[in-house]
Amino acid sequence: MMDLQKKLEQKNIKQFQEDLISWYEQEKRDLPWRSDSDPYKVWVSEVMLQQTRVDTVIPYFNNFIEKFPTVEALAEADEEKVLKAWEGLGYYSRVRNLQSAVREVHERYGGVVPPSKEEFGSLKGVGPYTRGAVLSIAYNQPVPAVDGNVMRVMSRILSVWDDIAKPKTKTLFEKIVEAFISEEKPSEFNQGLMELGAVICTPKSPSCLLCPVREHCSAFAEGCEKELPVKSKKKKPSVKTLAAVVLTDEEGYIYIHKRPASGLLANLWEFPNTETQKGLKYEREQLAAFLKEEAGIEAEIGPLEGVVEHVFTHLVWNISVFFGKTLDQPDDSYFKKVTKEELAEYAFPVSHQKIWNMYMK
DNA sequence: CACACGTGGGA
DNA sequence: TTCCCAAGTGT
């Protein structure tokens, strides 16, 4: 394997920049967050785009900006409303960190997103990628923004065979982009690299014949573009079995519970549920015992209505679903009583939306 | 460093 | 069906 420094010396970086940037300026997609360079909007879009497809983000971005158009609006919003606007997007800590960071910007920086690497980069939820993306796109600073696209594109350009799943490899690509980034047009350069990865230099079958920088590409020259980048596989998710109940009382109220402030699906709402033993059979009894212990509720639980399977990245939930009626009132605040209409104001994970859909059918 | 942390879409 | 994702960050 050739030394990286040698590979860099063989590249015509100025020409690469020019080819990439002129392609980007001509071919860039018209996306909602590209209508202006308001640092707040750029920031929101970058957080939403973390591990999430553009097509998925577009409607969420439009709705979020309509509800929370400025730093001040998001800083002063109820977390409940903010989570509701994020419902279904996943990785919910992103938005709790974003609001926390925006509140800091509001209070400490007078609502102005700080343009310095140190200050912006130290905010909650702002890692090396988001820092580079916002500072380059909104403030035109030559800071690398290395995401999966950039690692894929540059691994091919330079024929780098390091495993991009390793944190150390990301550091390597940050150094590489430092050497390649345009000082004149860092915003177009960074976005061009990501745009190229999204529409041309794709993972499975890259469209090399349409690529504006294929003449700079070592992998294309060597015919190994489909072998790169190298990415080690993740382990299979483990399975958890649960039983959940849509619990109502005589007045038609529905009982819901707010999840803990940290961990999986933090601060989202859910229907009463408990982890069960894989053997099944006594699920109803386990559920009844859970209701009794947590809230002192005696309930009549009906037959098994169905099973919801929900797959997370690292985990599978297998939820047996029941419907139940309370026989008395709860004696503490473990659950909240809401009407069917009020239920729509609370943010639920998709797994529990499936449970609700089962009940409404 | 390895793993937790969501979801929906495409091959 | 199964697998791999898609503009990462926190711990």
Image: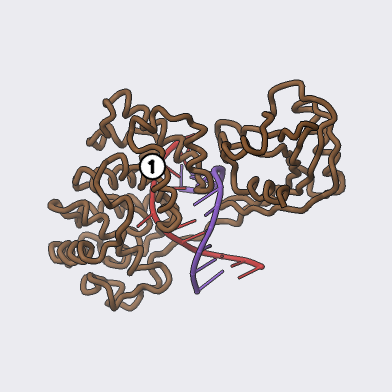
Chain colours: A brown, B purple, C red
How many numbered discs?
1
Residue A264 seen from this side: no
> Residue at (56%, 31%) from the top-left corner?
A261
| Element carrying mark 1 | helix
Front-most of residues A300 and A156: A300
Residue holding disc 1? A66
Q: Is residue A23 above or below residue A222?
A: above
Q: Is residue A321 left or right of residue A176?
A: right
Residue A43 seen from this side: yes
Front-most of residues A156 and A330: A330
Residue A10: x %, y % from top left: 17, 67
Q: Is residue A361 above or below residue A201?
A: above
Q: Is residue A49 above or below residue A334?
A: below
> Residue at (35%, 59%) from the top-left corner?
A149
Query: Quick one: quadrant of the N terminus of chain A?
Result: bottom left
Q: Is residue A73 left or right of residue C5?
A: left
Residue A223: x %, y % from top left: 33, 78
Crowd around label 1: few <14 · some 14–19 · many ≥20 (10 Å): few
Front-most of residues A341 and A89: A341
Q: Is residue A299 left or right of residue A244?
A: right
Chain letter of mark 1 equals A
Residue A232: x %, y % from top left: 48, 60
Q: Amino acid at mark 1?
A: Glu
Q: Residue furthest top?
A: A331
**For residue B4, what is the image quadrant?**
top right
Q: Is residue A359 left or right of residue A69?
A: right
**For residue A335, what is the image quadrant?**
top right
